[in-house]
Image (tube, rainbow, N blue to C red):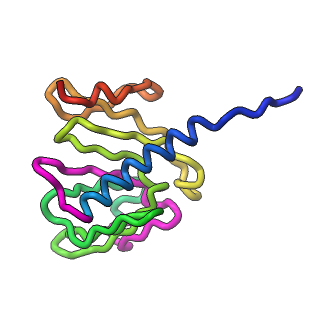
Amino acid sequence: MNVVPTLPYDHWIEEAMRGVVRRALREVADEGLPGAHHLYVSFITGAPGVSLADDLRARYPEEMTIVLQHQFWDLAADEDRFEVTLKFHGRLHRLVVPYAAVSAFVDPSVNFALQFRPSSTAAGDHAVSAAPALSPAADGGISTDAPGEVITLDRFRKK
């Protein structure tokens, strides 16, 4: 049986969406957060290239979500990763996160969310289950939908 090669649209879309994350973080690094914007970035803590303190890795062995809003310092968004300093339990910690490790990116101020599928390269040796897709909740927040549901970006735009 011959396997017919196909164009990797899913890979291209994932790459383009990670480009949106990169561009947003570069804009914030250069200009700061405009207006009421604030960002939630979730990432796989065991992914290759992720650098965080041992106590944070122990507390968040699989996935961690950070908030970029009022107290973050020295945000740098490079081509393949971002770095930021955040305060946890009264101590400053420098985090380095490759874009390939990002599992979700949310800006609830404009009801915008991107969900990324875990990959074997992002998860390294850690087993990661598929996360549910994010969507706006009835109260304007973010809730989860059943896994596998296709969500269009129109659902996140303010009307």
Tell me if residue 107 comes above or below residue 51 in the rendering. above
Q: Is residue 40 magenta?
A: yes
Residue under the image location 44 percent in, 29 percent down: 147
Left or right of 3 on screen, residue 146: left
Q: Quadrant of the N terminus?
A: top right
Closer to the camera in the image, 143 or 80: 80
Residue furthest to the right in view is 1
Q: Residue at x 25, y 65 (%)?
A: 30
Residue at x 67%, y 35% (from the top left corner): 7
Q: Position of residue 38 (x, y in %)?
A: 19, 50
Position of 59 with respect to 15 (left or right) is left
Q: Residue at x 28, y 74 (%)?
A: 93
Q: Is residue 85 above or below residue 148?
A: below
The picture places residue 109, in percent across and down from the top left corner, at: 17, 41
Asked if residue 153 is positioned above or below residue 85 in the image, the reply reads above
Q: Which range of residues does the magenta coloring cover?
A: 30-58
Residue 134: x percent and y percent?
A: 33, 34
